[in-house]
Amino acid sequence: MTIKTKLFLILPLIGMLSCGKAKNEDKGTEDKEGNTTSITIKGSDTVLPLAQKEAEEMMKTDSKVSVTIVGGGTGVGVTALLDGTTDIAMASRDLKTEEKLKFSEAKKEIEKVTVAYDALAVIVNPANKVSQLTREQLEKIYTGAIKNWKEVGGEDAKIVAYSRESSSGTYEFFKEEVMDKKNYASDILSMPATGAIVQAVSQTKGSIGYVGLAYETKEVKQLSVSYDQGKTFVAPSVASAKDKSYPISRPLFYIFDKINAAKVKAVVDYALSPEGQKIVLEVGYVPLN
Amino acid sequence: MLSSAATSITVVLIVFFLFIEGAGVFTKKPIEEGFLLAVHSTNPIKKLEPSQVKDIFDQKITNWKQLGGKNEPIVLFRTEDITEFYSDEELGENFEHFPAKIDEYVSKTPGVIAFFSDKYKAKNFHGKELEINKIKIFEFLSGEEWFPTAQPIAQMGVKALIYGTLWVSFGAILLALPIGLAAAIYLSEIARKRTRNILKPLIELLAGIPSVVYGFFGLVVIVPLIQNVFGLPVGETGLAGSIVLAIMALPTIITISEDAMRTTPRAMKEASLALGASHWQTIYKVVIPYSASGITAGAILGIGRAIGETMAVLMVTGNAAIIPHTLLAPLRTIPATIAAELGEAANGGLHYQSLFALGCILFLITFCINMMVEFVTNRNSHKKH
């Protein structure tokens, strides 16, 4: 009994101490048992559901490829590609200059393939009269300069702004794209999941939030957004994101080393194929064409 | 003997690990490793506080005059901005002219503040590098802004998080303790056997519900309720957190105190009744003092659950890192912060270590509460004899 108890206590501890190390270990990118190629995809949590669905469908039809998908964020994926511990990096943003420099230092030529587009919709409570905002107004709301709906043409009510947690790529994207890289005000409420933002906005009268296009529901109202100081307002939709008239959208990428091109071809080709693009729409992103 | 030794060693190891990781935060600068902030060589500013750097990059401070420098508008420069000033050819195919171009840009822009990797610092760099202090324990504890991922300088102030944790836990205990005690007294002294046999399993069932379910219940039911009852603009408040935590702590408090009360010897109760004391007098003069240590144990375990709870709180308190002045405002707790941010924090980085430091603070808070309770119960039991 005592030895058993001891084991029970010590095993999780060993597990805990070793898991920190395990993360850095190579995932074994290629093992040639028979003819199976195993491909590792790592990176953005935004691309993750798409990559996962595509991999599942692909592995159903093509048994020669085995795909492992790991999240962690775009930065994690790019670093892994640089270290050679992943074959494909998923990215929900373009490479930073810093990262490009690192690739050129490591003498790696990389190729970037756009697999889908994602658009962010700004949502408010359906009871809210405001139906459009400019980028500048959004920036001021999230940096705390505008605190009342009155200032943007609505009722006299306090603005309750919801954001994602700082670990989210969406948080960074909104900060860079809409807020001109300024920091969020500290009284912005942050929610652990996009679903929680939709729920909170639907039940809070003066609320505003941002979610991926895939999350649109009837309980919240989507706002039209203007990026030219209020001349034209565009409503978020798959169509407007596709023809690029909707400004808060971003391409989602697969990035890989050119040396590996032949190996990852199956995955990339599938993502670009009509079936792959159908999955894009199902998962809630915007297909390429 | 062996198993208790193993338990102690495990606990000590975990605490040791926690503090080793947590202490790392005080050996680092709040700027990303390998990066530097530089200004023009004629700029009189030598040193900036993290909060000043943040305000500069948020464009809240736009002139060097506001920082005691010359009357010169501040020009922000980040590495990726270089492409706006120089073409790809000028930078070279493999970015080999990068350091020289940054140097050139910095030296021809008097109001510049540049943020770039020190790999691209030219050998004879003409700008002036700003000094950045390591994070001090006092600043960490008293800082009011929590932006661990802010660029170029992370804001590591945990005061708002500590206050948030204490407010929510205090509110939860305030709600849970009276209700829990009342329920325990009812179950052990007043309820009939049949009623107790139905109620007790039901209460214990509460303890088995996963905390995410409590969180979702809080978000969908309690949050709108609070919003309507108090007429607030937002329902995600400390109070919502306190209520959810109180519900979660109740089964522990009720079960343990009820068990303690039931161990009161029948002879003691009967003696009290025989002396002419009423049923109620017997309860609070005999049963409660006799079972005081059991009740405190229940309360401690309840508090422990309240302070350390993550998921439920994460979903209902709004997580805004501001110092709360009332339970009716959004707040952010330490466990919720760790749960929400650890997933994305780079292993071994500043953010990662600061989350461990938060864990240390949490540990110290619970440790202090335990010591306090221990002290109080010891004194009480002394008095009894």
Image: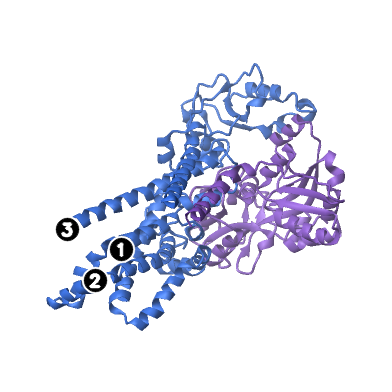
> Circle 3: is it few (<14), some (14-19), or many (20+) Cα within 10 Å?
few
User: Residue at 16% of width from left, 74% of height from top?
Assistant: B271
Q: Nearer the viewer, residue A225 or B323?
A: B323
Residue B164: where, in percent of width, then height? 41, 52
Q: Which residue is mark 2?
A: B265
Q: Is residue A146 visible?
A: no
Chain letter for the purple part: A
Chain letter for the blue part: B
Circles 1 and 3: CB atoms closer than 8 Å: no
* Residue B266 sits in quarter: bottom left
Q: CA distance from mark 2 to mark 3?
A: 17 Å
Name the amino acid, label 1. Answer: Ile
Q: CA distance from mark 1 to mark 3?
A: 19 Å
Chain letter of mark 1 equals B
Q: Is residue B266 left or right of residue A193?
A: left
Q: Which residue is mark 1?
A: B295
Q: Which mark is residue A186?
A: none
Q: Is residue B60 left or right of residue B282?
A: right
Q: Which mark is residue B385?
A: 3
Quick one: label 1 or label 3, which is nearer the N terminus?
1
Name the amino acid, label 2. Answer: Pro
